[in-house]
Image (cartoon, grey):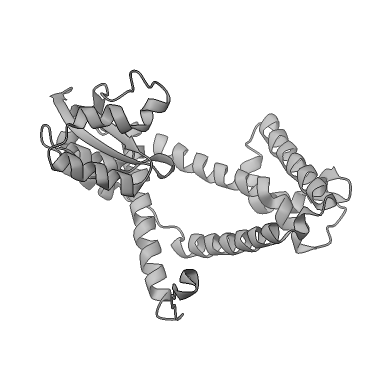
Amino acid sequence: MKILKDVERNRYIVRKMIILFSAVTFVISGCTKKEKNVLVRVDGSTLTLEEFQKYIPESEYKNLPEETITEILNNWANQEMLYLEAKKKGIDKEDSVVILIEQYTKNLMAMALIRRSFGTTTVSETEILNYFNAHQEEFTYAVKLAQIVLPSYESAMLTYNEIQSGADFMKIAKERTLARIENPENPRIITEYLPRGRIGDFSTEELIFKLKMNEVSQPIPYIQGTYLIVKLIDKKKIMPKAELNDELRGQIYNHLISKKYQEFLQKFIDSLKTVYKVTTDLTPLKK
């Protein structure tokens, strides 16, 4: 089933990324490595089989193609060489780098804590079916949108308020959308017909598919910190009945597990606020 493949692929990507950054962690920790079962050696630095297995268990790497394992090891070696060269130049002693290393360590520990606490949380087939049934009609339609991409929440709210006060959506879109960067003379403002599962994350799609004809959305968080304002231009039925196939099931699973993670994270942080006292004082910034 695709849903299982997606989960396994994500787990593999995460572990691979840990391998890529593990060089920094190993060297900073100052631990003495055993010379036994060395997979990669870069001068005095080594990556052993035992260390490799901490990130990719034997049951998994035994099923990986040899070229994939070689790629991971090459990436580790590349990262190690860059680290050693940076250390040779004294970059690890620079204040700005020391701060970043400290912050990275904090982030890594925080992620490990959250990952362990979130544990084996999953999404049941019943939850997937419930979501599908609640949104089934939406999956039979495709929408055509006019869109404005803006660089910040402040600029997006300013634009949204202007449109709500009667400003022409299309005129503002041509003048302000970030799509002008690619084609100033003819920025991409009108989309093709887009079905559910092809626009963005499901939370964004839920907002868009609730719009009435010619209704304008409030600013929606978009990619890389930008914000999106859309206007529903048209909506048409593209199939008589939606089917819960493997692809859609996987998309729903990813959406629901993401929501569970966000809800868990917020509750977890709220619980920590009862343990740790947090105070904020902006006075020093105003001196």
Residue 255 seen: yes
Q: Which corner quadrant of the image does residue 162 belong to?
A: top left
Residues 151 and 76: in front is 151
Measured as percent of width and height from the top left, residue 30 is found at 80, 63
**Quarter the N terminus occupies:** top left
Q: Which corner quadrant of the image does residue 252 belong to?
A: top left
Q: How many numbered marks have been drawn onto this rendered protein structure?
A: 0
Measured as percent of width and height from the top left, residue 273 is found at 41, 76
Residue 31 located left or right of residue 117: right
Residues 204 and 182: in front is 182
Residue 116 located left or right of residue 213: right
Residue 133 seen: no
- Vertical arrangement, residue 143 with respect to residue 56, above or below: above
Measured as percent of width and height from the top left, residue 143 is found at 20, 28
What residue is drawn where x is 83% and y is 58%?
A: 33
Residue 185 located left or right of residue 28: left
Q: Residue furthest top?
A: 185
What residue is drawn where x is 69% and y is 38%?
A: 72
What residue is drawn where x is 21% and y is 38%?
A: 208
Residues 135 and 159: in front is 159
Residues 168 and 103: in front is 168
